[in-house]
Image (tube, rainbow, N blue to C red):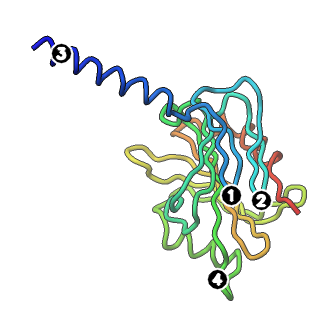
Amino acid sequence: MKTQIILMIGIFLAANLSCRFLSTEGQPTETTEATIEVTTEATTEARTYENDIFIVNIPEGWGTGLSEGEYFDLNVEEKVTIHSAALRINSDAFFTIASSPLATGETLESRFDLAYKKGPQIEDVSTSPFERDTLSGIDITYKRPWGEPWWQFRDIWLEKDGVLYVLSLHTTPNKFESYAETFSLFLDGFSFKD
């Protein structure tokens, strides 16, 4: 019996130590598509996310993570998500950049219209042209369900070289206005590489 207990404790310790040594949390991660610092703690300094196509500044205290998959039924693929807390699960605001190539004959406007007609159930919709420095496109704000509550979204749709880019901020209910200035900082710090 003592041998079994000692063996079980040994296995537990070995597994625990191997998880700690093999973990990449908090270490910079490089991929062929992009370089991003993945952290599990909020940093004290602002930093940058950069890939071959665009660059965006990340405010201090925000966590980051590479993303995959379709973004909220809009027919665009997530590239990176920046969240308001060090851990995504503790965040109440998210800034995501998603993209998708335009099909032959599609325009930014036609793809935008199709995304919200076929996409999520939305309410309180406001749409306007978007112009900022060298960027131009379509700006839409709306509410939609995400789990139990209705979340507030603001999506900026841009096009460059036949590819759509959606810069999206979404927050928990009643937090949207408190992140308006931060979203403006994201937009000011976003640019395409030439």
Local secondary structure at mark 4: loop
- Of the numbered discs in the image, which one, if any, rests on residue 52? 2
Indicate which disc, 2 or 4, sits on the residue closer to the N terminus: 2
Amino acid type, label 2: Asp
- Please provide percent x and percent y for residue 136: 82, 64
Cα–Cα span, label 3 and label 1: 48 Å
User: Which quadrant holds residue 24?
Assistant: top right
Spatial CA span between label 4 and label 3? 62 Å
Circle 1 sits on which residue?
Answer: 33
> Horizontal and vertical percent for residue 128?
73, 63
Q: Position of residue 95 (x, y in %)?
A: 64, 46
Q: Is residue 143 left or right of residue 39?
A: left
Tell me if mark 1 has few (under 14), some (14-19) or many (20+) residues whose alpha carbon lies within 10 angstroms of its own: few
Q: Marks 2 and 1: in contact by CB < 8 Å?
A: yes
| Nearer to us in this view, 141 or 100 | 100
Labels 4 and 3: the sequence-earlier one = 3
Residue at disc 1, secondary structure: loop
The mark closer to the camera, 3 or 1, is 3
Are there few (<14), some (14-19), or many (20+) residues within 10 Å of tag 2?
few
Q: Is residue 133 left or right of residue 55?
A: right
Please say whether residue 44 is visible from this viewpoint: yes
Q: Which residue is mark 3?
A: 5
Q: Amino acid at mark 4?
A: Ala
Q: Where is the C terminus found, in terms of image quarters?
A: bottom right
Residue displayed at 14% across by 11% down: 2
Q: CA distance from mark 2 to mark 4?
A: 21 Å
Disc 2 to disc 3, C-alpha distance: 53 Å
Closer mark to the observer between disc 1 and disc 4: 1
